[in-house]
Image: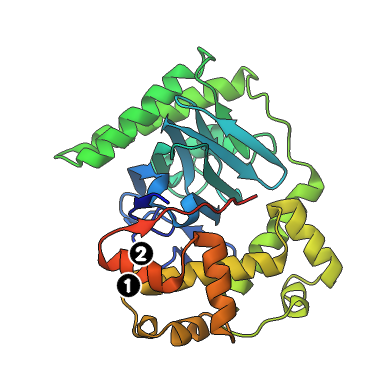
Amino acid sequence: MKKQDLYPEDTDPKEEIPKRDRDSLVRTYVKNEEFPVSGYHLDFAKLYMNIVRWQWHEEVEFFLIESGEACLKLPDRRIMLHRGDGAFINQNQLHSIHSVGEHFCTARVLKFHPSLLFGYGHTQLSVKYLTPVLSSPALHYLPLKQDDPEVLPVLRLIEAGVSCCIRGDFGYELEAKSLLCQLWYELLVLFRIDRLGVAPQQPQSNVDSERTKRAILFIEEKHMEPITLEEIADSIHVSKSECCRCFQRALGLTPFEYLMKYRIFESTRKMMRGSAEADSIADLAASVGFNSPSYYNKLFRKYLNCTPTEYKKTLQNGNAFASEFSPE
């Protein structure tokens, strides 16, 4: 097993899961509401299970693979991305990304709220330049392959935008906004000349995605409790069998599998934050919804290839074991 720093997804383990409106599906990842843009390096070797778990957010997202290979997962397809490739993820699109192969992937990630470009509301510019992309059924995502010369300006601007945000020197906000406007222009050029090569999501896929989002919110909110499949299905107003089919079509998982993985995920966050429950493995297991510490240990080993006790020791030493878990 390889050793590494391990963080749950692309966030600081001491911070809360991204904000959301309890009564809606709105989620936001960018912290600065005054200037809603974030650019950073992402090392999959430092992620929980080496995967950016299933998520969606109000921000649009661009990323560029710097090394290794990654698989972009969406409710109705899987896309392989190699070094130098990138992708655009539209706002509120359910997606996940994981490293592929022997060498962990690294990437540059750029997220920003569309309002940064033209402000909030239906302004003339937002209707002309934002709405066609944000509301397009054919642009839930866009692979950006480096072998396409029309895509190269987009890839260069992603790299420049991330570098600008990381530097954060005087006036970086002005430079970043200029780069984002150029980036959006290049995206519109690709969109306008019909080079997308992306099939619109099927109606069933859209239905599955929205149902799955709501079920995920229910699971994340109730994961400490002994929730049942019937309760998960009731939360999205479908039968138990349809709930299972919906999860399988969208995520390739059953609701129960997602619940178990999320509970393990939450337990690693508690260990990283030094929560009181983490002092005892039995208390830790109970705090995330496991009635049996032995079953918790079994699943933890299955997903992270080590026991919770071993994991805690590696955290104390400033390292953690690499996961051999496959998200498929």
**Residue 265 visible here:** yes
Answer above or below: position of 3 versus 13. Answer: above
Distance, label 1 to label 2, CA atoms, is 7 Å
Amino acid type at image mark 2:
Pro
> Are the residues flagged by discs 1 and 2 in contact, CB closer than 8 Å?
yes
Answer above or below: position of 84 versus 141. Answer: above
Image quadrant where residue 198 sits: top right
Image quadrant where residue 215 sits: bottom right
Q: Which residue is mark 1?
A: 273
Q: Residue at x 64, y 65 (%)?
A: 258
Q: Which residue is mark 2?
A: 13
Callout 1: helix, strand or loop?
helix
Q: Position of residue 34 (x, y in %)?
A: 30, 54
**Residue 22 visible here:** no
Q: Nearer the viewer, residue 121 or 290?
A: 290
Instruction: Specify few, some or many for label 2: CA neighbours under 10 Å numbering under 14, 14-19, or 20 or more.
Output: some
Q: Position of residue 149 (x, y in %)?
A: 50, 12
